[in-house]
Image (cartoon, rainbow, N blue to C red):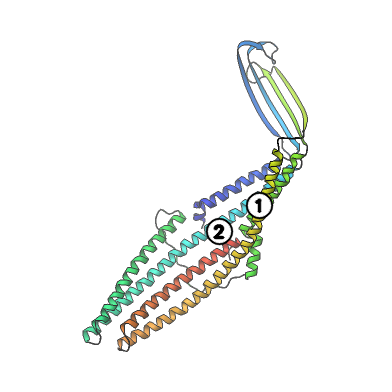
């Protein structure tokens, strides 16, 4: 899982968004206590001497250095709303990281379990080939002894051919699944999966209602939508700040001379500035309208996501319950199919049944075993899907 997460572009991007949101939050806190500081210097050279403020005489070049400090004292409450938006953006980034991590886990578990399932299907196909070969030998012996007609051996030869083709296909599918797992974990080639236990899947530790409530409380998808709604609401409130006066404090130091590191003359200035935009061709109104529209859209998205999360949580919960029950039924089907094949083999050796009934029993057993493999795979995949919605392991 860790190797797959390091290689997943979506998870790497989610980690980057956390870093970006963290700096935005630091900046939102910093504007309350720290001023803006800038340092600059310039050199002016002329073809003819001119008056130098630093030396009080004529010179063909002037060097000056400046240090400017400014502090935004009042912004109509916008600093507080920007801080709220930065906090919401951080919450959204953290929830996105959880979502990306569990999506990566879901894809990795799907590839991992697919390798296990394909290996089991190869085993099922191999058993089908083995049974067909053994029955073909029995049928040929019965044909030679006159207890059966030649079509019996031909039917089993056809079954052996079909089983061999199916085995080749399953082996190819296993190879592709191993290469895909290798790609997922960063291995330049096929990667194998360690078989997991085949015990029956346990019941979920939470009820359906609890799963829905948990998905709405800490599920990453809903947390992202809720955080984005809060961020949009804070941005809409901050947009009203341009209708209020802004107060800035400033201070500057400037030095002049004929060379660098000027010290001939220096000046210091400080003061404050109050500004209130009266009319800027409707730009404030446009910005406010857009902020309100974004807020309304975010609210609608959050409401829709809330309903979608309810539906997805119920779907994932029922998918696991159904897959778990299907796996149990598939196990029973394998037992029945195996007993049926034993009976048909005994009856065929005794001449009490036809070769078609025997072949049908063999195919039924192979299909039942393949169905059990698929049911186990579906159960593990359904559990991973529910965990991705809840944002935690079960």
Residue 296 coordinates in the image, percent (x, y) = 68, 52
Tell me the CA gap for discs 2 and 1: 27 Å
Tell me if I can see residue 201 in this picture.
no
Residue 125 coordinates in the image, percent (x, y) = 36, 71
Tell me if I can see residue 328 in this picture.
yes
Q: In the picture, residue 374 is in which quadrant?
A: bottom left
Q: Give the number of the disc on residue 104.
A: none
Report the quarter where the C terminus lies: bottom right
Q: Name which residue lies at 62% across and 70% down.
A: 208
Q: Mark 2 vs mark 1: which is more N-terminal?
A: 2
Q: Name which residue lies at 31% across and 82% down.
A: 355
Please state which of the two labelled residues, at mark 2 or mark 1, is closer to the viewer. 1
Q: Name which residue lies at 63% across and 67% down.
A: 211
In depth, the one of 57 and 355 nearer the eye is 355
Secondary element at image label 2: helix
Left or right: residue 252 versus residue 380 is: right
Q: In the picture, residue 271 is in which quadrant?
A: top right
Residue at the disc numbered 2: 102
Marks 2 and 1: CB-CB under 8 Å? no
How many numbered marks, from 0 up? 2
Dot 2, how many residues are within 10 Å of its Cα: few (below 14), some (14-19), or many (20+)? many
Residue 244 coordinates in the image, percent (x, y) = 78, 39
Residue pushed farthest front?
281
Q: Give the number of the disc on residue 297.
A: 1
Residue 330 coordinates in the image, percent (x, y) = 47, 76
Q: Is residue 385 above or below residue 67?
A: below
Q: Is residue 217 above or below residue 287?
A: below
Dot 1, how many residues are within 10 Å of its Cα: few (below 14), some (14-19), or many (20+)? some
């Amino acid at each position: 899982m860790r190797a797959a997460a390091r290689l997943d572009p979506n998870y790497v991007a989610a980690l980057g968004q956390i870093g970006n949101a963290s700096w935005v939050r630091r900046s939102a806190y910093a504007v309350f206590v720290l001023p803006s500081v800038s340092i600059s210097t310039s050199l002016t050279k002329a073809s003819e001497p001119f008056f130098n403020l630093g030396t009080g005489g004529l010179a063909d070049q002037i060097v000056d250095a400046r240090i400017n400090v400014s502090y935004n004292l009042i912004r109509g409450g916008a600093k507080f709303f920007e801080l709220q938006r930065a906090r919401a953006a951080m919450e959204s980034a953290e929830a996105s990281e959880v979502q990306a991590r569990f999506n990566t886990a879901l894809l990795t578990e799907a590839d991992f379990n697919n390798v296990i399932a394909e290996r089991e299907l190869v085993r099922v196909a191999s058993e089908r080939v083995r049974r067909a070969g053994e029955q073909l030998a029995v049928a040929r012996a019965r044909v030679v002894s006159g207890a059966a007609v030649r079509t019996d051996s031909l039917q089993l030869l056809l079954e052996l051919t079909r089983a061999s083709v199916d085995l080749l296909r399953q082996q190819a599918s296993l190879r592709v699944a191993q290469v895909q797992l290798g790609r997922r974990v960063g291995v330049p080639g096929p990667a194998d999966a360690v078989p997991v236990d085949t015990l029956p899947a346990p019941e979920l530790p939470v009820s359906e209602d609890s799963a829905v409530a948990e998905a709405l409380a800490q599920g990453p998808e809903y947390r992202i939508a809720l955080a984005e709604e809060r961020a949009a609401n804070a941005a809409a409130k901050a947009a009203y700040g341009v209708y209020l006066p802004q107060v800035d404090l400033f201070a500057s130091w400037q030095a002049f001379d004929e060379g660098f590191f000027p010290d001939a003359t220096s000046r210091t200035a400080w003061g404050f500035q109050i500004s209130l935009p009266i009319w800027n061709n409707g730009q404030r109104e446009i910005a406010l309208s857009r902020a309100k529209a974004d807020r309304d859209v975010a609210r609608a998205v959050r409401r829709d996501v809330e309903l979608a999360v309810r539906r997805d949580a119920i779907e994932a919960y029922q998918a696991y319950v159904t897959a778990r029950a299907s796996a149990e039924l598939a196990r029973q089907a394998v037992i029945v199919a195996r007993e049926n094949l034993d009976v048909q083999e005994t009856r065929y050796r005794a001449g009490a049944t036809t070769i078609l009934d025997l072949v049908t029993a063999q195919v039924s057993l192979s299909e039942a075993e393949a169905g059990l493999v698929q049911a186990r795979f579906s159960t593990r995949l359904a559990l991973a899907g529910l965990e991705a919605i809840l944002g935690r392991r079960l």
